[in-house]
Structure formats: C-alpha cells, structure tokens
Amino acid sequence: MVSKFTIIFFAFIAILLWQCKSSDTSKMTNDSVNYMAASEVLSDTITISNPDAEYDIIIIEPGFAQWLATQLPKESYTADVLAIRNRTKVAEWNRRVGQPTRFNAQLYEQPINYFSNVDYGLEVNYKLFMYFKFFEKKYSQNLLQ
C-alpha cells in the first residue's frame, strides 16, 4: 500500500527532475504562466512556477496550503538566503534517504535533486523552504542535524 506522503514525494521529485528539460523561454509570456498563491488554492495542492528558470514544484500535502497562508510572505526573504537554507536541508534529507534503518524510510524514500549551481529563483526556493518547515513540524523532524 502506497502512503499519501509517498505519492506527494514522488510528484515533488518528478517535478524537480523535469527541470532538466530545455526549452526556449523567449517564447513564454506572463499569460502562459499560472502562479497560484496559497489563498487561491482550492485543495491541498500548490503549484510553484519559475518560468525564467523553467522549474515547477507541485506540493500535495494535507494542511500545507492553509499553513503556508499563515507564514511570512516570500518578499520577507531573499532567494540567496533561502537557497543556502534549502541546500542544507536537501543535503540532510538525502543523507537520511541513504540510512533507511536509522530514519523513517516512509518519510525519506527518494533523494531530492537540488543543484547548488542552479538559480531556482525566489518563488521556488520560498515554497521549498516552507515545505521543509511544514514537514519538520508535521512529522517532528529536524533537518539541521
């Protein structure tokens, strides 16, 4: 039986992997990009898009949209600071994936491909950082070990 978290996590990873595809961003317009604020979310699905860098993340996690709406806005952060924090949390996440007997294998099933040399932009870094905060709180985890 596949847990809801497993499906969410695989969707998240698939989107991160999709980032590697190449396309011509000069043909994209603002009308072709759908940004969805937490207050506009009708369910527990949040889509994060960065058309300049061609990255999307889809987070499907019960309660995340409502929780996100109560957090500081993305403008309270800089993309660089969030990228540094995300690199640290991704490194710890991936370390835990490699130790399934020590860490809950249902929480840490697959590594996250987050590349330090890629500029994901404020939108993607903010939502990924906020997801990590939500994950840590919901599952009583600390990704700073």
Image: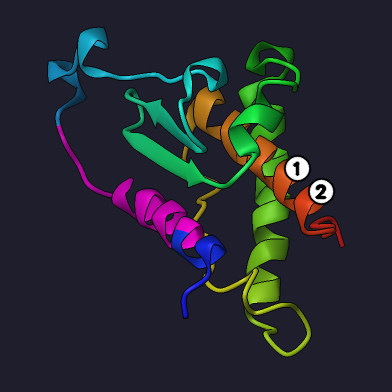
Q: Main secondary structure of the magenta part?
A: helix
Q: In which quarter of the image is residue 80?
A: top right
Q: Going 64% across and 42% down the picture, which residue do you hit?
A: 131
Q: Which of 57 and 67 is in front in this view?
A: 67
On the image, numbered disc 1 is attached to which residue? 133
Q: Which of 97 and 85 is in front in this view?
A: 97
Q: In the picture provided, is 142 more to the left or to the right than 120? A: right
**Compared with residue 26, is residue 97 higher up or lower down, i.e. above or below?**
below
Bin the neighbour count of mark 1 within 10 Å (Cα to Cα): few under 14, some 14-19, many 20 and up.
Answer: some
Q: Which of 89 and 22 is in front in this view?
A: 89
Q: What's the distance in space between the residues labelled 2 and 1, CA to CA? A: 6 Å
Does the segment drawn in magenta span residue 101? no
Give the residues drawn in magenta, as a range. 8-23
Helix, strand, or loop for circle 2? helix
Q: Going 34% across and 23% down the picture, which residue do you hit?
A: 52
Helix, strand, or loop for circle 1? helix
Q: Please state which amino acid type lies under the numbered disc 2.
A: Lys
Which disc is residue 137 wearing?
A: 2
Q: How many labels does the image show?
A: 2
Q: Give residue 85's position: percent from left, percent from top.
A: 73, 41
Q: Quadrant of residue 134?
A: top right
Do labels 2 and 1 touch, CB within 8 Å?
yes
Q: Give residue 137's position: percent from left, percent from top.
A: 81, 48
Q: In the picture provided, is 110 more to the left or to the right than 106? A: left
Q: In the picture provided, is 8 more to the left or to the right than 31? A: right
Does the segment drawn in magenta span residue 19? yes
